[in-house]
Image: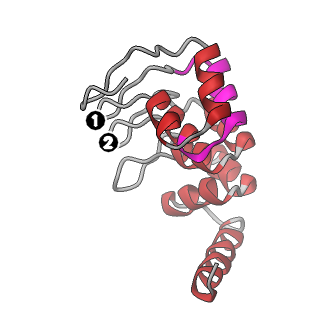
Amino acid sequence: MNTLQEDMIVDCKFELDQQEKGPVDCENFLKAATYGNVKIVNKFLEDGGDPDTVDGFRKSALHRAAFEGHVEIVERLLDKGANIDFQDQLACTAVHWACRGGRLAVLKLLQSKGADLNGKDKEGDTALHDAVRLNRYKIIKSLILAGADIKIRNAVSIV
């Protein structure tokens, strides 16, 4: 990580710490989900914020937390009514994002809550396609054992 990236993370954490003192806006809620700041996520939700709040790419807090592996935040969002199969601009779900991030614990939580393991993104890829492409062995095994369909073809007819 370079100095610029470190400075950006410090600035973001400072902004999130400041949010604890007043109402949390949508942008900082999404940042909090990304960086694992449970206090800010809880405050936003307790103040009546929508758990399905999205950014300009329709990527939700659930998508962000799933990709980063923040199990506690994923669980809290689902408990507050976040749509488990919500699709972003490219039709990716939290399951896709958890698999891309290699987040087995998040994937298992999503499975236990009834997430669709066979949902397709705009390219026709399922989470299993993503896991295979990224060589996520434990994710692949978990998806198959949970009943993911291994015969679904994507847009380029790859099984």
- Answer with left or right where residue 109 lies relative to residue 87: right
- Residue picked out by circle 1: 122
The disc labelled 2 sits on which kind of residue? Leu
Q: Quadrant of residue 140?
A: top right
Q: Is residue 17 above or below residue 7?
A: above
Q: Give SS at disc 2.
A: loop
* Label 2–label 1 contact, CB within 8 A: yes
Q: Residues within 10 Å of mark 2 (few under 14, many from 20)?
A: few
Q: Quadrant of residue 11?
A: bottom right
- The quarter of the rendered structure image containing the N terminus is bottom right
Q: Residues within 10 Å of mark 1 (few under 14, many from 20)?
A: few
Bounds of the magenta segment: 100-115
Residue at x 57%, y 56% (from the top left corner): 29
- Answer with left or right where residue 94 lies relative to residue 3: left
Q: Where residue 24 is drawn, which disc sits there? A: none
The disc labelled 1 sits on which kind of residue? Lys
Q: Give SS at disc 1.
A: loop
Q: Nearer the viewer, residue 32 or 121?
A: 121
Position of residue 38 measured from the top left corner of the image (x, y, whole percent): 73, 52
The Cα–Cα distance between marks 2 and 1, rounded to whole angstroms, is 5 Å
Residue at x 59%, y 22% (from the top left corner): 143
Q: Is residue 11 above or below residue 58?
A: below
- Residue picked out by circle 2: 90
- The quarter of the rendered structure image containing the C terminus is top left
